Image (cartoon, rainbow, N blue to C red):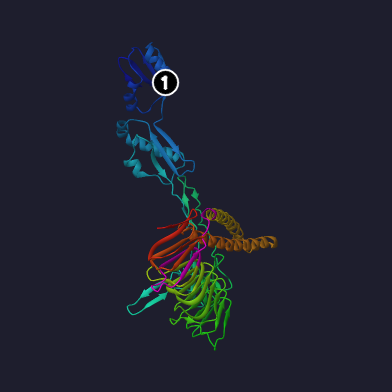
Amino acid sequence: MIYEKNDFFILEMEEEIIYMTVFQKGFSILQLNPILNEFPQISLDNFKDLKEALIQASGEKIKVGKQKPLLDWNIAEDKMTASVKINCSEEYLRSHHSKIVGNILQDLQRNNITEGILMHVLQNQLGVKGSNVVAKGTEPVHGMDAVITYYKRSDRKPAIREDGKADYYDMNFLDEVKKGDWLGEKTPPTDGTMGKTITGDFVLAQKGKNKKIQYDQKSVEAIESNGKIVLRAMIDGVVEFKGGRISVGNHLVIEGDVGNETGNIEFEGSVTIKGTVLDNFSVTATKDISILSELGISNVKEIHSITGDVFIKGGIFGKGVSEITAGKNIFVKHANESHLKAGQSIHIGYYSLGSFLKAKNIYTDEKKGKLIGGVIEAHGKVRAAVIGNKMERKTIVNVQGFNRTNLKEELNETLLRYKSKVQELDLMKEKLEVYERFVGQLNVSQNYQYEHARNQLERLNVEIFHIDEKRKSLMDTLESKGEGEITIGQMAFPDTRLQIKSMEKKLNDLTKGTFYAENNNLHFD
């Protein structure tokens, strides 16, 4: 078969071999491109001899390539697709379309390809440029991972709310639940749908990843309902998360006041007092304490939360020295002649008058909050709208300050430790997943290893929780300006003494702005 014959050469095919006979010089290799485009079935693979033949024009018949097959197949190794390259001109394809389609169908049958044949491609979309996908398997649909949803606890963000008649200092403090209340649920993973290859073999779907729902089995029960696992409270109490597990904590609710009828309160758990605490009585709890009377408290002996927060909706009228202490935070409408000490932060809605305040950070409402008289001691920052008053009552604000470089290093170490523990936790979860597939089939030794792994998981959850609490505390401190900050939102009055680290400033004029320590100097913005 002769492909091209001109004044320079003859290009022909004999028994699938391409030959060229050059008898006149002056034709370059680049000039062959239009011919090759017209006959895509030609494959030139002997360029050295071809170039030499064009230069020498010896008239000798030289092998320069071979003819490609009309149909060049590519069947994917996973048998999910079959594609074909048609080596001919577009004109040839148009004039021989039915024959080429027939050849394709014969080749498909010869290769046992019976599924997913794309007839619309064969009939209307075949082309000579690039490959044509003519058969496509059905991909498996992998299963959905298990989905777990837990009760969302309220954010402890106090706010001053106005209803046109009065202002209220309020917040969602404790999330109370009753026996049987919803606490969470798990939608199990799905199996997915099998796929099929172009040769008719089934392709297994990957089952969705299972997840373990974490809950305290002493206070929360798991019930199967409508294909889900639903968590419900076993007792009345408050929602808590202990070591990554949801639980219902002990909750003592006092409908009225703490006084002669109740005596002093000591409770392992959280306490809600819907009334007030009368003079000379005390409340101690291991967790949170909430006093909801808008009358507040006065001259109490002590309010003490060992590990939690204290919320006093109506404020404190000291009369004498009222001791309010919290392992974490204190939220109070106002404080008169009182002692407040918190492991984390103190939040005051309206004002503190002649009180002693000590915490890592001390905040008042940015528009209405005032610190008047007394001593205010913080580790990282103090922020108030107003400090002091027109009567120039002596107010001392002391911020201990910190070393930012050291704190950043401590934060980095904490983050690395957190990452390491989370990776350890993930490995432990994978280990437990293996055991849980064979629960009921484990021998004594395997059961012991399973229980040991569960205890390790719980320990890691608790450890990660405490590391994360430390991370939050460090980041909160690092949010302070410089290495210790006192921010005055509206004004500070004369005779106010500010101290950050070892640097002190006594105000002689009305002042507004931020004082902060940096490079052993006291700066003001």
The residue positioned 32% from the left and 78% from the top of the image is: 164
Q: Nearer the viewer, residue 198 or 455?
A: 455
Q: Is residue 228 visible?
A: no
Q: Position of residue 113 (x, y in %)?
A: 45, 43
Within the magenta stretch, is there residue 383? yes
Q: Compared with residue 220, is residue 475 higher up or lower down, i.e. above or below?
A: above
Three-letter amino acid code of the residue under disc 1: Phe
Element at badge 1?
A: helix
Say which quadrant the C terminus sits in. Answer: bottom left
The residue positioned 34% from the left and 36% from the top of the image is: 127
Q: Is residue 209 left or right of residue 25?
A: right
Q: Position of residue 363 (x, y in %)?
A: 45, 67
Q: Which residue occupies the extreme bottom position in the image?
A: 261
**Range covered by the magenta-colored residues:** 377-406
Q: Is residue 62 visible?
A: yes
Q: Quadrant of residue 285?
A: bottom right
Q: Compared with residue 32, is residue 209 higher up or lower down, i.e. above or below?
A: below
Q: Is residue 274 left or right of residue 3?
A: right
Q: Residues within 10 Å of mark 1 (few under 14, many from 20)?
A: few
Q: Quadrant of residue 129?
A: top left
Say which quadrant the N terminus sits in. Answer: top left
Within the magenta stretch, is there residue 389? yes
Q: Nearer the viewer, residue 188 or 162?
A: 162
Q: Which residue does the numbered mark 1 point to in the structure image?
A: 47
Q: How many marks?
A: 1
Q: Which residue occupies the extreme right position in the image?
A: 445
Q: Compared with residue 295, is residue 428 higher up or lower down, i.e. above or below?
A: above
Q: Position of residue 379 (x, y in %)?
A: 51, 63
Q: Position of residue 440 (x, y in %)?
A: 63, 64
Q: Nearer the viewer, residue 391 or 435?
A: 391
